Image (cartoon, rainbow, N blue to C red):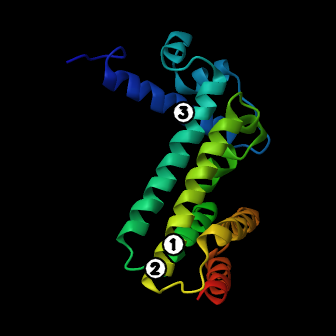
Amino acid sequence: MASGSNGPDGRRAERAKIVESAYRLLAVDGASASVTDILAQAGLGTRAFYRLFDSKDELLLTMFRSDGDRALGDMEADAARAPNGRIALHGWLGALLHVAGDPTRRPRVAVLLSDEVMRAQGYTAERKHYDERQERGLRALLDRGRQDGSLPRADPDNDTQWVRALMDRGFEQAIALPEGADVAPLVASLLNFVDRALC
């Protein structure tokens, strides 16, 4: 089994250090960070960086993809365990807004929405992949709710875009809340509207 920084475990550890260092440096509002800054924070050299990433843009896109895939994977797994489409949709929307309001996750969200990340070459394609996966998930939940009777007024072909727009607006409002503010009233308001529209 390979060991040290050249083995799989060593590379994973170095990758984690670089990613966490990038998050720390970029978490300051409007901050930018060079590869040199990130490596100094991580206590690693350029060889380690370029063994793992081709460029700073690739690092930023890896951060976006990794956190996005993790969040959507958790939401999809929770939805699959829900007893019906309505409860699954409630969980999906609530989870997303709670991410924005969670003080431990909020700084990472702010980094992923920063100009620094959005300027990365390839960001548009990564964002498109995330948005399409999000919309497929929402459409599946609406279709499930229509079929099991828990969302009887749902029209997945037309309603997915509107639920997505509501979710995005709710997310923006959750991000804009003061740090430490309770996101629960915002979640309840969104879910109440969705229920009145689809049930």
Count numbered badges in the picture. 3
Q: Could you tell me if the residues under marks 2 and 1 are in contact, i.e. CB atoms within 8 Å?
A: yes
Q: Which quarter shows the N terminus? A: top left
Q: Could you tell me if the residues under marks 3 and 1 are in contact, i.e. CB atoms within 8 Å?
A: no
Residue drawn at (53%, 46%) of the image: 67
Residue sticking out furthest to the top: 47
Residue sticking out furthest to the left: 1
Where is residue 197 shown, x and y percent of the image?
Answer: 67, 85
Q: Secondary structure at mark 3?
A: helix
Where is residue 65 shown, x and y percent of the image?
Answer: 55, 40
Identified by mark 3, the residue type is Val
Residue drawn at (65%, 89%) of the image: 196
Using the rendered view, name the quadrant where residue 24 is placed: top right
The residues bearing labels 3 and 2 have C-alpha atoms spaced at a distance of 42 Å
Where is residue 198 shown, x and y percent of the image?
Answer: 61, 84
Name the one closer to the observer, 143 or 135. Answer: 143
Q: Secondary structure at mark 2?
A: helix
Q: Is residue 131 above or below residue 141?
A: above
Q: Is residue 126 above or below residue 43?
A: below
Identified by mark 1, the residue type is Asp
Residue drawn at (38%, 67%) of the image: 80
**Mark 3 sits on what residue?**
19
Where is residue 151 shown, x and y percent of the image?
Answer: 53, 84
Residue 147 is marked as: 2
Instruction: Give the foreground label among 3 and 2.
Output: 2
Q: Secondary structure at mark 1?
A: helix
Name the one closer to the observer, 65 or 100. Answer: 65
**Mark 1 sits on what residue?**
143
